[in-house]
Image (cartoon, rainbow, N blue to C red):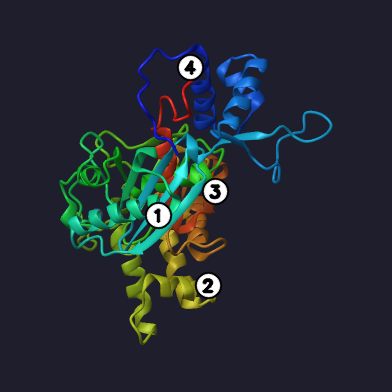
């Protein structure tokens, strides 16, 4: 694949229009030729010629019609939708969890072409974590046979709030070794591509909105119940980070004035009652071997009544705070993520029940509580979605 090269001579009008077509496909997802005409305001004949050229040089491809849901415009096949191929450039998404790292390379249309998953104790050493991430980045490019120059953007998700102006990990006991570091700096040095860090729960929200349970929804709340409890907020199709980057820290809403001391330094935070370590602690007395979150997920799957009770109670406690959030924000969908979230499971049921009970009737009626469909890949897919959103400018198709 040929990487992007700076063009040394003025670009022709045709090259400019080719880039407009590519940008339309990149920014609007799988579009038809008619959509491209509308977006670019170019004529039908011009779009037809430009698309033919881009298919010819391998920048675009037509998607298979299977699963086509658009209204047929006449007899015969529905209009073909277009997607960018890997020759138009790539993005890489990375997502650090507490014990693992996921990395994927995708086209600018969001098709994942390679993905890796490694176990990693992310809290221990920042240097080791970044070295591992850089190693996985190189391995994935070797696997798909692309040079690093083909990667337009890298987005990396971290399970912590980040200062929205500096990109540094803010004071937070989840990642003690990472506080006040800019993970993008260290990673950029290693992968030699532009890197943007983002709070993983925000990426979960973007991932579900772009590829999962929230497709087509403009106002949604993604709630992740894990070692902590966090929310990613999407207003009017855009991620809301807040003035400094702390928006959505649902786990630190106070629910008990004299409750347990929280790792944030406050008291009685939601997290002190319902994060996975507390759920595990509640269930542990009934089990001989030490439980993990995955064990609790398996117990739920198997219909264990104790697990369903504890997780359902956690859902109701979270839902009580979420009801207030819903009163303030009036979202269309609440998407429940994290390892314990299952379709028709106790967690989402508990949350749904509490929102129905404690939110204003009009707010409760407007909101659907559902589980994420991307499961533990939501943050990774959100990283890809954000990396694509940040990619602008000419693509790598050959100049005239
Ligand atoms: Zn707290």
- In percent of width and height, residue 58 lies at 56, 35
Other-residue count near label 2 (Cα within 10 Å), few / some / many at <14 / 14–19 / ≥20: some
Q: Earlier in the sequence, mark 1 or mark 2?
A: 1
Task: State the CA–CA distance, disc 2 to disc 3.
Answer: 21 Å
Q: CA distance from mark 2 to mark 4?
A: 54 Å
Q: Which residue is mark 1?
A: 224
Q: CA distance from mark 1 to mark 2?
A: 19 Å
Lower position in the chain sequence, tag 2 or tag 4? 4
Residue where numbered disc 4 is placed: 16
Residue at horizontal 42%, vertical 70%? 310
Q: Nearer the viewer, residue 41 or 396?
A: 396
Mark 1 or 4: in front is: 4
Indicate which disc residue 301 carries: 2
Q: Position of residue 264 (x, y in %)?
A: 20, 54
Residue 186 % position (x, y): 20, 46
**Could you give the CA–CA distance between mark 4 and mark 3, rounded to whole angstroms?**
36 Å
């Amino acid at each position: 694949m040929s990487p992007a090269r700076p063009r040394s001579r003025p670009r022709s009008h045709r090259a400019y229009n080719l880039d407009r077509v590519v940008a339309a496909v990149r920014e609007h997802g799988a579009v038809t030729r008619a959509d491209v005409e509308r977006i670019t305001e170019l004529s039908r004949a011009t779009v037809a010629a430009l698309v033919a050229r881009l298919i010819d040089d391998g920048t675009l491809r037509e998607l298979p019609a299977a699963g086509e849901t658009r209204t047929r415009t006449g007899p015969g096949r529905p209009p073909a939708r277009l997607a960018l191929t890997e020759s138009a450039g790539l993005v890489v998404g990375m997502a650090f969890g507490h014990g693992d790292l996921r990395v994927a390379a995708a086209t600018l249309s969001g098709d994942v072409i390679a993905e890796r998953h490694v176990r990693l104790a992310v809290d221990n050493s920042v240097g080791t974590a970044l070295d591992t991430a850089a190693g996985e980045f190189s391995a994935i490019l070797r696997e798909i046979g692309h040079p690093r120059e083909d990667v337009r953007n890298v987005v990396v998700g971290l399970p912590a709030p980040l200062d929205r102006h500096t990109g540094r990990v803010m004071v937070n006991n989840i990642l003690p070794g990472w506080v006040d570091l800019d993970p993008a700096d260290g990673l950029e040095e290693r992968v030699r591509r532009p890197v943007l860090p983002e709070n993983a729960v925000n990426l979960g929200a973007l991932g579900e909105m772009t590829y999962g349970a929230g497709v087509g929804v403009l106002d949604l709340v993604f709630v992740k119940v894990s070692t902590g409890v966090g929310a990613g907020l999407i207003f009017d199709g855009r991620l809301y980070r807040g003035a400094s980057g702390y928006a959505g820290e649902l786990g630190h809403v106070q629910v008990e004035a004299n409750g347990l001391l929280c790792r944030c330094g406050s008291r009685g935070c939601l997290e002190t009652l319902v994060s996975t370590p507390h759920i595990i602690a509640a269930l542990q007395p009934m089990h001989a071997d030490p439980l993990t979150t995955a064990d609790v997920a398996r117990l739920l799957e198997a219909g264990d009544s104790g697990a369903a009770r504890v997780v359902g109670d956690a859902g109701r406690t979270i839902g009580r705070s979420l009801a207030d959030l819903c009163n303030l924000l009036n979202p269309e969908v609440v998407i429940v993520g994290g390892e314990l979230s299952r379709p028709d499971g106790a967690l989402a049921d508990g949350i749904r029940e509490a929102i129905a009970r404690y939110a204003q009737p009009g707010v409760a009626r407007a909101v659907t509580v559902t589980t994420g469909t991307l499961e533990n890949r939501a943050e990774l897919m959100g990283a890809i979605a954000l990396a694509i959103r940040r990619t602008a400018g000419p693509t790598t198709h050959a100049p005239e």
